[in-house]
Image: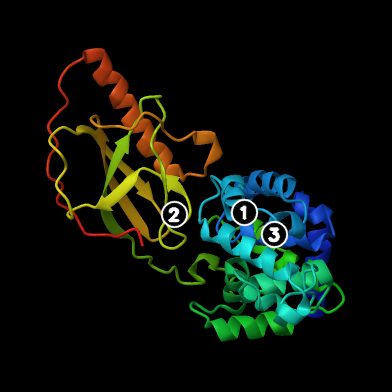
Amino acid sequence: MLSCNDHRNLLAWYDTHQRELPWRNTNDPWAILLSEILLQQTQVSRGMVYWKRMIEAFPTIESMATSEVDAVLKAWEGAGYYSRARRLHALSRQVMLPSDQGGFDGALPKNYEDLLSLPGIGPYTAAAVASIAFGQPVACVDGNIRRVMARHTAQPDPAPKAVQAWADSSLTSERPGDWNQALMELGATVCTPRRVKCGGCPIQSTCKGRHEPELFPTPKKSRVKAISMLAVVEIAGDGRPVLHQRPLSGMFAGLWGPLYHEANSMTPDQDWLVCGTVEHLLSHRKLSVHVFLKTTDVPPLGTLRSTVAISSLDEKVLAMAAKHQHAAQKREGVPQRAKQVNAETVAWS
């Protein structure tokens, strides 16, 4: 439990030391929601870049709702975890619906329960938007707040319900949005996973874990699954790559790219040029993509890259294929013989 002095000290610290972030200079609920969606799995430094891009492209909920999902994915390009963009687009369309059709008449709902009903909105985001944008007394819990709570109470592995109960009991109803942000800011800049800055912590006097802070909470081991795929790149007669849009479900859903296959579901053609392997790390998967360039029977026209959204993985794959195509053209030799790739089976959907 935090004391009255803790509350006063933490809010005073936040007022003085909070980072200058663009979404903190607005009361627009849409802009605040957008920041929360982006920061779910994106570092703040990168999140600012994408937030500015998205708010310029879609300054209102209506502007996104009246756009196609492809336009949203294109604006989101590079931010990763594209399911967030697809759900945000679905959210905007639901908000714009009349209330008798399950919508909110074009206005983002103010209360936690209604926010939680929207696509892509979980407990944390609903609480953050309700408190920050609308001043609702709802406590947030994210990774930063869990770490602050674990150290303050000296609990190595606090259960989610215990963390939420601590956050609920600590919440101040006078400035709930600032309070939630203050706790998160403390975890992000002072009570960090490593190199903890306890000397600058405004609530250190009541912290039970301050003598050995890095013992709390116990780090969780994440399992990374190794996956291999085979990518077949075609570069058309006009010099542009031939790209295909993926289904709106599965990995990189809705994005464009070359054709990918299960690594051991097909035998590479003997005439394909072997380009190499691209390694790409996702949150819980390590992808090894074996890149081949198809050099025969290519279509005359490719895809204009600037008109479609592609992932950073596809950027790497296309760059590797283009490099080898140029080298092969200079040599004017015979492409290397493609070799069988033996790897774990994986499907795109």
Height in image: 66 above or below 147? above
Assign the N terminus to one quadrant of the image. Answer: bottom right
- The mark nearer the N terminus, 2 or 1, is 1
State the residue at coordinates (26%, 13%).
Answer: 330
Instruction: Tell which tag, 3 or 2, sits nearer the viewer.
Output: 3
Judging by the rendered image, the residue that carries numbered circle 3 is 65
> Callout 3: 10 Å neighbours few (<14), some, many (20+)?
many
Asked if the residues shown at circle 3 and circle 2 are in contact, with their CB atoms under 8 angstroms apart, the answer is no
Q: Is residue 339 left or right of residue 147?
A: left
Res. 238 image quadrant: top left
> Callout 2: 10 Å neighbours few (<14), some, many (20+)?
many
Judging by the rendered image, the residue that carries numbered circle 1 is 68
Asked if the residues shown at circle 2 and circle 1 are in contact, with their CB atoms under 8 angstroms apart, the answer is no
Which type of secondary structure does the marked residue at label 2 adopt? loop
> Callout 1: 10 Å neighbours few (<14), some, many (20+)?
few
Q: Is residue 44 left or right of residue 136?
A: left
State the residue at coordinates (60%, 79%).
Answer: 153
* Type of amino acid at the residue the image marks with label 3: Ala
Instruction: Tell which tag, 2 or 1, sits nearer the viewer.
Output: 1
State the residue at coordinates (77%, 51%).
Answer: 59
State the residue at coordinates (14%, 36%).
Answer: 338
Res. 299 image quadrant: top left
What separation in Å lies between label 2 and label 1 (alpha carbons)?
A: 17 Å
